[in-house]
Each structure stands twice: as C-alpha cells, then as structure tokens.
Amino acid sequence: MLRILKPRSVRVHKDPFQVKQEVHACIGCNECLLACPALAEPITINVLNKETLTGKISPSVARFARSCYQCGACVSPCPAGLHRDAMMMWLKVRLVSPELQVTEDGD
C-alpha cells in the first residue's frame, strides 16, 4: 500500500523568548554557516547570534540576512538541532523594525 508522506511543518517565525532560547543553545560550531549557500562574506556565528538578539545590525550581517532565502540548508548540519532559518527570519524582522530586540525577560 502506498503511503503519502506529509511534509513536517516548521514554524518559520518564533517569538522573542524562543529566539533567545535557540541562540543561547547554539554551541558555536559554525556548521550552519558552512552549509549556507547564501553566505557571501565571512561572518562568525558569535557575531550573528549577538546581532540576532540585540543591538545594531552590522552591514555584513544585514546583507547576509537579506540574501538568506530560508532554504533550510543550515538546519540539518546543526548538531544541537537548532533552526537557524527561523532565527534568520527574526533577524529579517529586526531589519525592518530596528527597535525590536529580545530583552532579558524574553519580551
């Protein structure tokens, strides 16, 4: 009997608390960035994580966020099982709403 496989849905946009949890769970191995076809210039995972959460977004991180097309290539190589694609969506939202940050209490 043929079984039809349904694709697993993944929530692409996370709330501030979830983004903070994912960033803090990152082990800093850079595997996600090594697998990314959109990364055109060197960026460290530490810089990307910091700018995903708070503060000013540097031009190089902004260019990377804009070039990310949510392909998911960063997800499978992550040994911690994180969804960098969802964190990139948060970063894209921050680019259009610079006042948006993740605070210590998750708001």
Image (tube, rainbow, N blue to C red):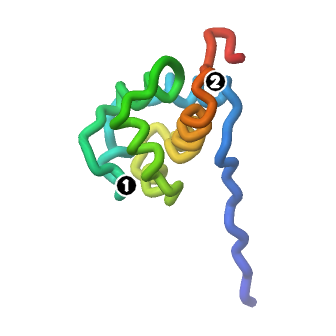
Name the residue at 44% across, 57% down: 73
**Position above or below: 43 against 6:** above
Front residue of 101 and 75: 101
What residue is shown at x 39% (from left), y 44% (from top)? Answer: 64
Question: What kind of element bears circle 2?
Answer: loop
Instruction: State the residue in front, 103 or 78.
Output: 103
Specify whether 21 is left or right of 60: right
Determine whether 70 is above or below 102 in the image. below
Q: In which quarter of the image is the C terminus?
A: top right
- Nearest the eye: 91 or 9: 91
Answer with the quarter of the image where residue 14 lies.
top right
Specify the farthest residue to the left.
Answer: 42
Extreme residue toward the top, this view: 104
- The secondary element bearing badge 1 is classed as loop
Q: Are marks 2 and 1 in contact (CB under 8 Å)?
A: no
Question: On the picture, is 79 further left or further right than 34?
Answer: right
Work out how far the residue at label 2 is from the one at label 1, CA to CA, in angstroms: 24 Å
**Residue 38: quarter of image:** bottom left
Q: Percent from the top left, x then y, of residue 50?
A: 44, 22
Q: Which of 78 and 85 is in front in this view?
A: 85
* Position of 91 relative to 106 (above/below): below
At horizontal 34% and vertical 37% (from top left) the residue drawn is 60
Q: Where is residue 21 in the image (x, y as percent from the top left)?
A: 59, 25
Which amino acid type is shown beneath numbered disc 2?
Answer: Leu
Q: Which mark is residue 100?
A: 2
The image position of residue 72, as x and y in percent, is: 50, 56
Residue 13 in the image, given as x and y percentages of width and height:
67, 42
Label 2: few (<14), some (14–19) or many (≥20) C-alpha neighbours in 10 Å:
some
Q: What residue type is labelled 1?
A: Ala
Between discs 2 and 1, the one toward the N terminus: 1
Identify the residue under disc 1.
Answer: 38
Is 106 drawn above or below residue 49 in the view shown? above
